[in-house]
């Protein structure tokens, strides 16, 4: 079976593994699971509704040059572009921003209606969708590379990254310049700690291997986002037994609510600072890896493969009926 992955390629000096890591990891797990699956990629260069739709001609040419069993589009706008052709059936995965923002839900609802199958990365996200067709819907979170994101020795991890052995490091979930990640709240909370030994690090321009090391090197992972779907940052931190402090976004409460030493916080900087202080003061390492075992990429790949084969078994008779094969 040949699948075309459609997703954004808009980042400067775009690197699929770095900028679309959750999609890259999923595809690699699928390749290892099933050698009969073949993947090609269509990276969208263009922002916003018109930017995405401007890529239709190139996508059409891609589909003429190679026969595909299905298109797997990631986020609603990619799904919209993919569904402008009706020859190849489309699976659309909704990741968060395409559902969480009210102005995006109308487009998402249309994409849901046009797609042959839809995937929501959390049940919380699916409940926000307008007019979602539950008969063709699946809830499948993005997975974790459990071979890469493992607990490591803190001292050795810091030495490899060139970090001080004497500081207390708080790892922010993204670059400081990403508005939806709410850096001002994180900055205010760190300032309230009034501790010069605490340093807030932004997560940007690191390789996947370096990110995995950072979760073992830092003292706490901090997420203050306004909106998320099912944040990889939290799941990958927990896989490394890194304590997490996070606002109540996406499925964070469900993912880590029962992990001792991790905290869900309000948007009050005093509350965020207090929870960070609790983590920094604790002498007890957390034990979270087993708690997120269900997100192992190998298990997620089995669910996605099942969707591919289910779609393929129903798509061929329909295409013949519609005269498209």
Image (cartoon, grey):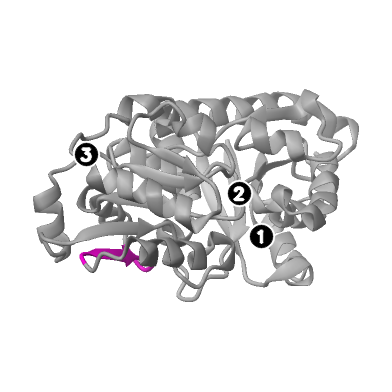
Q: Are marks 1 and 2 in contact (CB under 8 Å)?
A: yes
For the point 81% across and 57% down, the residue is: 103
Residue 4, disc? 2
The quarter of the picture where the C terminus appears is top right
Crowdedness near tag 2: few (<14), some (14–19) or many (≥20) residues, C-alpha within 10 Å: many
> Could you tell whether 1 is left or right of 298 in the image?
right
Q: Looking at the image, is 181 positioned above or below residue 138?
A: below
Highlighted range, magenta: 197-206
For the point 33% across and 60% down, the residue is: 193
Question: Residue 28: in sight, yes or no?
Answer: no
Q: Could you tell me which secondary element the residue under label 3 belongs to? A: loop
Badge 3 is on which residue? 151
> Who is closer to the viewer here, 262 or 30?
262
Badge 1 is on which residue? 62
For the point 67% across and 72% down, the residue is: 46
> Could you tell whether 73 is left or right of 283 in the image?
right
> Who is closer to the viewer here, 24 or 172?
172
Please tell me which of labels 1 and 2 falls first in the chain.
2
Q: Picture coordinates of residue 170 (x, y %)?
A: 31, 57
Q: Picture coordinates of residue 77 (x, y %)?
A: 73, 57
Q: CA distance from mark 3 to mark 1?
A: 42 Å
Q: Could you tell me which secondary element the residue under label 2 belongs to? A: strand
Q: Main secondary structure of the magenta part?
A: loop
> Could you tell whether 238 is left or right of 137 in the image?
left
Q: Picture coordinates of residue 254 (x, y %)?
A: 53, 30
């Amino acid at each position: 079976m040949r699948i075309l992955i459609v997703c954004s390629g808009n980042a400067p000096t775009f690197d699929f593994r770095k900028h679309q890591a959750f999609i890259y990891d999923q595809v690699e797990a699928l390749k290892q699971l099933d050698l009969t699956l073949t993947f090609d990629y269509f990276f969208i260069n263009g922002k916003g509704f018109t930017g995405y739709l401007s890529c239709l001609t190139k996508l059409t040419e891609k589909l003429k040059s190679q026969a595909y069993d299905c298109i797997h589009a990631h986020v609603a706008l990619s799904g919209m572009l993919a569904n402008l052709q009706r020859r190849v059936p489309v699976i659309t995965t909704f990741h968060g921003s395409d559902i969480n923002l009210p102005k995006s839900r109308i487009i998402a609802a249309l994409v849901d209606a046009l797609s042959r199958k839809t995937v929501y990365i959390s049940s919380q996200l699916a409940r926000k969708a307008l007019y979602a067709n539950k008969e063709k819907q699946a809830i499948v979170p993005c997975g974790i590379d459990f071979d890469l994101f493992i607990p490591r020795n803190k001292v050795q991890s810091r030495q490899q990254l060139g970090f001080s052995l004497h500081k207390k490091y708080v790892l922010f979930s993204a670059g400081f310049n990403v508005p939806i990640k709410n850096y001002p709240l994180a900055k205010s909370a760190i300032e309230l700690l009034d501790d010069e030994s605490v340093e807030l690090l932004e997560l940007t321009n690191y390789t996947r291997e370096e990110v995995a090391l950072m979760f073992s090197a830092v003292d706490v992972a901090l997420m203050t986002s306004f909106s998320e779907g099912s944040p990889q940052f939290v799941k990958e931190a927990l896989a490394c037994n890194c304590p997490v402090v996070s606002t109540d976004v996406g499925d964070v409460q469900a993912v880590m609510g029962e992990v001792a030493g991790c905290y869900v916080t309000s948007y009050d900087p005093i509350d965020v600072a207090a929870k960070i202080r609790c983590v920094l003061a604790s002498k007890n390492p957390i034990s979270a890896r087993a708690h997120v075992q269900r997100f192992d990429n190998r298990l997620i790949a089995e669910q996605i493969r099942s969707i591919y084969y289910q779609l393929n078994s129903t798509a061929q008779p329909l295409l013949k009926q519609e005269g498209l094969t």
